[in-house]
Amino acid sequence: REWTTIKEYEDILFQQYGGIAKITINRPQVYNAFRPKTNEEMLDAMAICRERADIGVIVLTGAGDKAFCSGGDQKVKGIGGYIDDNGVPRLNVLDLHKAIRSIPKPVIAMVNGYAIGGGHVLHVVCDLTIASENARFGQTGPKVGSFDAGFGASYLARCVGQKKAREIWFLCRQYTAKEAEEMGMVNKVVPFERLEDETVEWCETILKRSPMAIRMIKRALNAELDGQRGMMEFAGDATLLYYLMAEAQEGKNAFLEKRDPDFSKFQKFP
Ligand code: 2NE
């Protein structure tokens, strides 16, 4: 399969195959741990995916066969966060979580090894997770001086239930791909050699579906957890659909033509 490069970065690969964009964290020397620059680059790639009409699904993965992502790079962790090139402490992976939730296209975690700590949260936040048999899942925060009380807690609990979520966080154990699948936080487990083919097959099936229907259902599933912000995203798309209707255009046209709008011609649905 020929992946073509969309844009060159330092910490990530950003490639395309048909309607699929693939973002690969490319820091295998630290098991694909992220630093502030990695997240900045992933945010930039996500913004491009959002704008590009020819991209319908985004795959997030890690380079090599050892790790999907091992969380925040402990080697650049300072006081107050992960230190960027200007010496500023950051936790900008949270902006990436927001971008994954907000982009109106499915994001699939293709987990090729360890999904640990903030790397585990990253796969949890994605819409779907496909894992290879060698993948290992777990949180480490309470062991290494961190925690994610955002989606990494609340959405994890929605996926695996409150008791399991508490177990995962309180004990900081590692779980096999099969255990993660049984818990409900992984959609499918395949042998490592099948991982990309399986993921591409899922993407290609999704690409055959109605993009607007997928968009609305992602918004609806998010809104249940995301409170006012989730309702805002859902409502924004309701407005988009309304703007596409002749009924909305009549209002705007009437204003520009300095006449009263005539909405009587539009059907009132039961
Ligand atoms: C992933 C795991 C379990 C793998 O263990 P093992 O024994 O197979 O490999 P090893 O030797 O630990 O790691 C291989 C290389 O990758 C580096 C290691 O230091 C090692 O390099 P060398 O020392 O040999 O040069 N490496 C691995 N993970 C790294 C990391 N996160 N940062 C920097 N270097 C890393 C094992 O490596 C592990 O447990 N890793 C740490 C996982 C972790 O605790 N991550 C941070 C959690 S906190 C977080 O991510 C977070 C959050 O909680 C909330 C918000 C945002 C972020």
Image: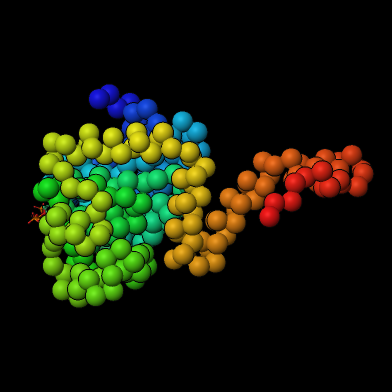
Seen from the viewer's position, the closer of residues 37 and 124 is 124
Residue 47 percent location from the top left of the image: 46, 43
Q: How many marks?
A: 0
- In the shown orientation, is residue 59 left or right of residue 176? right
Residue at x 51%, y 50% (from the top left corner)? 216
Evaluate whether residue 126 shows in this view: yes
Quadrant location of residue 255? top right
Seen from the viewer's position, the closer of residues 247 and 117 is 247
Residue 189 percent location from the top left of the image: 18, 47
Evaluate whether residue 7 shows in this view: no
Residue at x 23%, y 37% (from the top left corner)? 198
Q: Quadrant of ligand 1?
A: bottom left
Q: Is residue 171 above or below residue 210?
A: below
* Colouring method of the image: rainbow
Residue 270 percent location from the top left of the image: 68, 55
Residue at x 16%, y 43% (from the top left corner)? 190
- In the shown orientation, is residue 22 left or right of residue 170? right
Seen from the viewer's position, the closer of residues 182 and 67 is 182
Residue 184 percent location from the top left of the image: 25, 60
Residue at x 57%, y 60% (from the top left corner)? 232
Quadrant location of residue 156? bottom left
Quadrant location of residue 77? bottom left
Seen from the viewer's position, the closer of residues 205 and 57 is 205
Q: Is residue 231 above or below residue 15?
A: below
